[in-house]
Image (cartoon, rainbow, N blue to C red):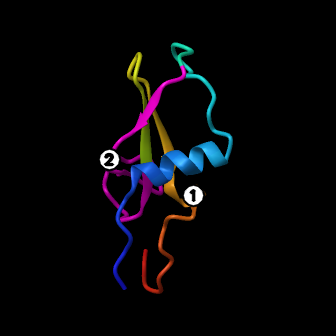
């Protein structure tokens, strides 16, 4: 099964639908953009610094257009993570 492509416009709509429209936590302005691509945060079981897991947290990055503050939003909260057998 082909995984869906990331869509920043869908993320923007879901943020509005969820009421996640507060002003920027740094400058209090209220203009944001969602990057056209997503990223992943690596998840590790301890703080040794050695890569021990392939697990990641996929996130959308929302950026304040005034000051550039970056706010990550977990894609799982938007039901955008395919749940296929065998996925890690």
Residue at (65, 48) in percent of width and height: 17
User: Can you identify the residue that label 1 sits on?
Assistant: 78
Labels 1 and 2: the sequence-earlier one: 2
Residue under the image location 43 percent in, 56 percent down: 58
**Above-or-below relation of 68 to 4:** above
What residue does disc 2 label?
36
**Magenta stretch?**
30-59
The N terminus: image quadrant: bottom left
Q: How crowded is mark 1: few (under 14 residues within 10 Å), some or many (20 or more)?
A: few
Q: Is residue 13 magenta?
A: no
Q: Relative to the observer, which residue lies in front, 17 or 86? A: 17
Residue 46 seen in the current view? no
In this view of the protein, which residue sits in the foreground, 76 or 4?
4
Residue 49: x %, y % from top left: 34, 46
Name the residue at the top extreme: 27
Residue at disc 1, secondary structure: helix
């Amino acid at each position: 099964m082909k995984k869906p492509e990331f869509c920043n416009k869908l993320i923007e709509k879901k943020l509005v639908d969820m009421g996640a429209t507060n002003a920027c936590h740094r400058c209090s302005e209220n203009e944001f953009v969602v990057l056209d691509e997503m990223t992943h945060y690596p998840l590790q079981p301890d703080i040794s610094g050695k890569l021990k897991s392939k697990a990641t947290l996929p996130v959308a990055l929302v950026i304040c257009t005034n000051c550039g503050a970056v706010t990550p939003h977990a894609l799982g909260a938007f039901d955008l993570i395919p749940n296929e057998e065998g996925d890690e």
